[in-house]
């Protein structure tokens, strides 16, 4: 029974760790830069593994959520800065995910995506309001496994794996692209791989599911197996784009272009799985981002939060989620291209990363909260290295965005 | 930094951000700048045309659902249309080279727009053969656009 | 205060401020947004009350931000700042545990308002998620 639980956790992790940001950014980068930026996805993967594990461990040991502890440990002002940055970025990501679901449904039905948006928003609210947390997570995660269609398509393309591997290990920026654009997209890939919401959703989710110290092993397996497999799917996406879109000079700015390589290489059945995977992954991420906005506010202000209590008992939490949903839906309904929203959301995620990650490092090191479960020296060293990397990325992001006109 | 200084810097930063994000298209003062814009437009046009071509080829192989084909073609057409609109709205510098470049690219863009529209219409009418036949016009257009892009790089 | 915590020396910042307050059943009540101190008979400072809400939290932000938060909060409510008497505090650990139940405390007017006017009107608010 325990083994089944672990297996389920891993499977949902794979499916659950790819969202619209990963879909769009990896395809876009693969089509423009080949595999020469795959290293950024891999570095991002290591980063989020480290910080998600810390954040999950904090939840299992203290049985409290990240934001709850951030304010306590760092004070209300630092906590507020953390809250505002995380909330705004996550709300933007929420909008991108809602747009992503609508785009995926448009692909399946050719009904204009704007008509789907209100329906998607309503269902997102309904599921957050009524459906059990574990069912939500496991459902979205398992269905998201359909994205492995990218791997199947890659295999069908019969690539020179050695050549691809060489591009990953020994990256070489394409001559036609400028250095500034190259680094801008490296930052975008960091942001896509290390989205802030995934870390505090993981910790709040751990509290929702009632983790305790004995769940540490499951939590760690979830992280160390799930995220790398999610990163593998990201690399598959980039590789498919490299092999099919790049030679044709196709630049990715629609979800349909992300799907074309799979259809081209592997046919209708794979395409059907892929679209299912799109819908599941983006809808799951929409639920996660929506809940995360609620978690962030509630945990800072001390409100009762979570789906583990009746909605009546967590009124402000549910209201916060609903208001965020309305705002996010409103943004999508202004007809701004959801793919554009996505592209900006990943870069802003990279900018907000230090504010969201630094407190986690502090808390997971605090013996008052963690006791013996606090970070070891090796982990601290690695985590600090990453903190430096994300601070550099965060600081460089805006100048690069201006310089490259958001990647053009 | 003084409070005033910080305020000014912030305003400047926001201003620059807004300028960047609106991707303001305006004048191309020199022929060099105009060539640069033509180059970007040509590449974007190629991207849309190749997307449509790939979709048609995939559909001809029996690998694409009708809905995905339609959505892809109409999105490619919309993207192409906005490339053309953006390029046309740029005021060219007053040289004959710029004028020649403009008319050459404009001609290619107009033909491309019409081909993409034909593809979209054929796809929506489920006229597979007509669509494949129309798609034969795409590659030569792409080649010409590519030549223009090379010449302006 | 209970016997064990009577006279316990606290570092306000580290042990008390911004802590989560939970009731005797473990339900979340609020955060310790601020405290009110009083001088005891022996001359030492004791914590008399826990202050809650934006009007309590606002002044703890330095500068403009604190002024704004307090100004907005003061417009929204003219009732006295919600407080919890420190006598109700049973223990201070990773959270501040009260000996009272959430239902007996009237410290979250916003929660009550949202619940009564918005959340209760939506079907399904009484049921746990299934």
Image (spheres, rainbow, N blue to C red):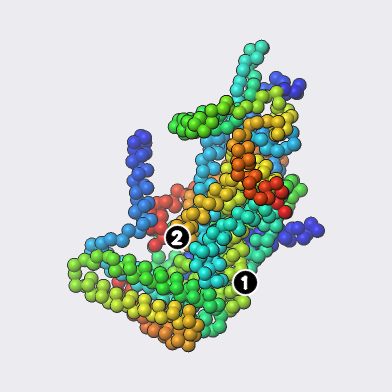
Marks 1 and 2: in contact by CB < 8 Å?
A: no
From where the camera sits, is residue A66 visible?
A: no
Q: Nearer the viewer, residue B110 or A367?
A: B110
- Residue identifier under label 1: A273
The residue located at (38%, 58%) in the rendering is: A404
Q: Is residue B81 rendered to the left or right of residue A221?
A: left
Quarter holding the N terminus of chain B is top left
Location of residue B117 (image quadrant): bottom left
Q: Is residue B127 rendered to the left or right of residue A206?
A: left
Spot occupied by residue A78 in the image (x, y as percentages of width and height): 53, 38
Q: Tag on residue C13? A: none
Mark 2: few/some/many CA within 10 Å (<14, 14-19, 20+): few
The residue located at (60%, 30%) in the rendering is: C52
Of badges 2 and 1, the one in the foreground is: 2
- Residue identifier under label 2: A335
From where the camera sits, is residue B66 visible?
A: yes
Location of residue A41 (image quadrant): bottom right
Q: Nearer the viewer, residue C20 or A27?
A: C20
Q: Nearer the viewer, residue A34 or A198?
A: A198
The residue located at (54%, 49%) in the rendering is: A324
Tag 2 secondary structure: loop
Tag 1 secondary structure: helix
Spot occupied by residue B110 in the image (x, y as percentages of width and height): 32, 77
* Mark 2 or 1, nearer chain start: 1
Location of residue C65 with respect to B84 vertically, above or below: above
Location of residue C84 with respect to B44 vertically, above or below: above
Q: Nearer the viewer, residue B50 or A190?
A: B50
Mark 1: few/some/many CA within 10 Å (<14, 14-19, 20+): some
Location of residue A148 with respect to A88 vertically, above or below: below
């Amino acid at each position: 029974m325990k083994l089944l639980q672990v297996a389920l956790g891993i499977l949902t992790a794979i499916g659950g760790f790819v969202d619209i940001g990963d879909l769009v950014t990896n395809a876009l980068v693969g089509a423009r830069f080949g595999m020469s930026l795959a290293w950024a996805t891999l570095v991002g993967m290591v980063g989020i593994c480290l910080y998600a594990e810390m954040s999950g461990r904090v939840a299992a040991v203290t049985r409290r959520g990240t934001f709850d502890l951030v304010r306590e440990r760092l004070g209300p002002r630092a906590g507020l800065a953390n809250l505002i940055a995380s909330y705004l970025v996550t709300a933007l990501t929420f909008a991108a995910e809602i747009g992503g679901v609508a785009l995926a449904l448009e692909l399946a039905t050719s009904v204009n995506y704007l008509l789907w948006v209100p329906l998607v928003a309503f269902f997102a609210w309904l599921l957050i309001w009524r459906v059990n947390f574990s069912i939500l997570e496991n459902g979205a995660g398992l269905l998201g496994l359909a994205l492995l269609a990218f791997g199947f398509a890659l295999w069908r393309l019969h690539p020179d794996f050695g050549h691809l591997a060489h591009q990953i290990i020994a990256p070489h920026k394409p001559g036609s692209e400028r250095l500034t654009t190259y680094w801008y997209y490296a930052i975008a890939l960091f942001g896509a791989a290390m989205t802030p919401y995934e870390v505090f959703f993981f910790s709040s989710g751990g509290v929702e599911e009632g983790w305790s110290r004995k769940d540490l092993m499951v939590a760690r397996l979830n992280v160390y197996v799930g995220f790398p497999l999610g990163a593998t799917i990201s690399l598959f996406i980039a590789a498919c784009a490299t092999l099919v879109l790049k030679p044709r000079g196709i630049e990715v700015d629609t979800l349909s272009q992300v799907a074309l390589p799979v259809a081209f290489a592997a046919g209708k059945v794979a395409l059907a799985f892929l679209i299912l995977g799109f819908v599941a992954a983006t809808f799951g991420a929409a639920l996660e981002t929506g809940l995360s906005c609620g978690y962030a506010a509630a945990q800072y202000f001390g409100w009762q939060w979570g789906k583990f209590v009746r909605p009546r008992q967590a009124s402000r939490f549910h209201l916060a989620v609903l208001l965020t949903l309305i705002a996010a839906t409103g943004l999508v309904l202004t007809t701004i291209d959801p793919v554009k929203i996505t592209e900006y959301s990943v870069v802003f995620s990279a900018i907000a990363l230090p504010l969201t990650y630094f407190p986690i490092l502090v808390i997971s090191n605090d013996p008052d909260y963690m006791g013996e479960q606090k970070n070891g020296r090796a982990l601290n060293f690695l985590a600090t290295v990453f903190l430096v990397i994300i601070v550099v990325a965060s600081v460089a992001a805006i100048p690069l965005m201006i310089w490259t006109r958001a990647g053009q | 930094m003084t409070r005033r200084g910080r305020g000014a810097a912030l305003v400047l930063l926001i201003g620059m951000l807004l300028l960047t994000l609106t991707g303001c298209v305006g004048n191309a003062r020199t022929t060099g700048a105009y060539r640069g814009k033509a180059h970007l437009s040509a590449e974007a046009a190629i991207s849309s045309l190749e997307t449509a071509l790939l979709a048609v080829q995939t559909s001809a192989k029996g690998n694409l659902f009708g809905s995905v084909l339609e959505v892809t073609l109409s999105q490619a057409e919309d993207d192409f249309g906005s490339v053309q609109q953006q390029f046309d709205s740029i005021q060219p510098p007053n040289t004959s080279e710029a004028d020649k470049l403009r008319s050459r690219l404009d001609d290619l863009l107009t033909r491309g727009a019409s081909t993409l529209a034909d593809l979209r219409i054929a796809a929506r009418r489920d006229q597979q053969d007509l669509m494949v036949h129309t798609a034969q016009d795409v590659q030569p257009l792409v080649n010409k656009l590519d030549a223009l892009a090379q010449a302006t790089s | 205060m209970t016997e064990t915590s009577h006279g316990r020396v606290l570092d306000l910042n580290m042990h008390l401020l911004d802590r989560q307050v939970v009731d005797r059943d473990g339900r979340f009540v609020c955060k310790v947004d601020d405290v009110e101190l009083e001088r005891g008979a022996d001359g030492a400072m004791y914590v008399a009350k826990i202050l809650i809400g934006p009007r309590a939290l606002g002044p703890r932000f330095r500068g403009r931000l604190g002024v704004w938060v307090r100004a907005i909060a003061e417009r929204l409510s003219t009732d006295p700042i919600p407080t919890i008497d420190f006598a109700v505090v049973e223990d201070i650990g990773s959270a501040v545990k009260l000996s009272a139940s959430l239902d007996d405390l009237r410290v979250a007017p916003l929660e009550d308002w949202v619940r009564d006017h918005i959340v209760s009107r939506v079907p399904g608010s009484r049921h746990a998620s299934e």
